[in-house]
Image (cartoon, coloured by chain):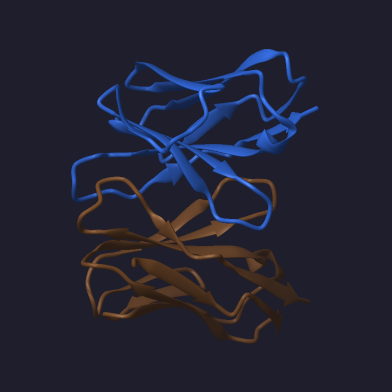
Chain colours: A brown, B blue
């Protein structure tokens, strides 16, 4: 069964304290893995798409990496405005539109 | 520009009302989606339109009726909803090339059914 698991469920960090969020997946062929950021009451904001193992993408303080089993979202020297829920979703190669979502990681950055 | 717009931002309706949610994108995307999201849960796919034709209906009750008037617009018509339908309703779009399938989401409509 196709599945996406995110860990931890919640993460509290001090401002400037770097860490990583994990997204592990089991799918019958990967078409793409997507990271989104979601603020309360708002729609998910696209961050990264990763397609193949070994791929890395960066944006400001965020860096996403991909292996054959999992993806990491590394956050370097986070600021309070990075506080949000981070969602990971996977598209299987036999699916045109459906995304398999993880439950999300709620990140809180304390000043 | 990767913007999807949705109106209204908030909607309160009674169980006997008829209302519509609207979504618009000008990115030239040919796939458009409706999702429902409950608190502390990931988005749940409802409908997908591809090239203005309904491609996926995830067994959604008939009180939700989607419409795609053209390639830039997507509507969701609501009728006789139940309180448990209260949620954040999200619209998304993607290029639909089979390769670049990143979905871009709108800000959502917060729906409350009384």
Q: Quadrant of the C terminus of chain B?
A: top right
Residue B69 image point, x, y percent: 38, 13
Q: Is residue B89 above or below residue A10?
A: above
Residue in view at x 60 percent, y 81 percent: A77
Q: Quadrant of the N terminus of chain B?
A: top left
Residue B10 image point, x, y percent: 72, 29
Residue in view at x 21 percent, y 67 percent: A29
Where residue A47 sits, quadrant-wise, is bottom left
Q: Is residue A101 above or below residue B26?
A: below
Q: Is residue A111 above or below residue B8?
A: below
Residue A82 image point, x, y percent: 63, 67
Residue B27 image point, x, y percent: 34, 33
Question: What number of labels is visible?
Answer: 0
Judging depth in this view, the residue of A30 and A20 nearest the camera is A30
Residue in view at x 28 percent, y 23 percent: B53
Residue A108 placement, left or right of A37 = right
Residue B23 placement, left or right of B49 = right
Judging depth in this view, the residue of B8 and A93 nearest the camera is A93
Residue B32 placement, left or right of A79 = left
Judging depth in this view, the residue of B102 and A101 nearest the camera is A101
């Amino acid at each position: 069964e196709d599945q996406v698991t995110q860990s931890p469920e919640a993460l509290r960090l001090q401002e400037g304290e770097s860490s990583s969020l994990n997204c592990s997946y089991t799918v019958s062929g990967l078409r793409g893995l997507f990271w989104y950021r979601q603020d309360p009451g708002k729609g998910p904001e696209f961050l990264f798409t990763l397609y193949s193992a070994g791929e890395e993408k960066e944006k400001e303080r965020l860096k996403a990496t991909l292996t054959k089993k999992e993806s990491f979202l590394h956050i370097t020297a986070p600021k309070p405005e990075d506080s949000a829920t981070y969602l990971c979703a996977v598209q299987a190669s036999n699916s045109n539109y459906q995304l398999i979502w993880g439950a999300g990681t709620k990140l809180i950055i304390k000043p | 520009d990767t913007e999807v717009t949705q109106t209204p931002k908030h909607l309160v309706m009674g169980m006997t009302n008829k209302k519509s949610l609207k979504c618009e994108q000008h990115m030239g995307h040919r796939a458009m989606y409706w999702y429902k999201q409950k608190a502390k849960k990931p988005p749940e796919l409802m409908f997908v339109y591809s090239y203005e034709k309904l491609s996926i209906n995830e067994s959604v009750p008939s009180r939700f009726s989607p419409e795609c008037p053209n390639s830039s617009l997507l509507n969701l018509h609501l009728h006789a909803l139940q309180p448990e339908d209260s949620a954040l309703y999200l619209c998304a779009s993607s290029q639909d090339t089979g390769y670049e399938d990143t979905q871009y989401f709108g800000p959502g409509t917060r729906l409350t059914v009384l």
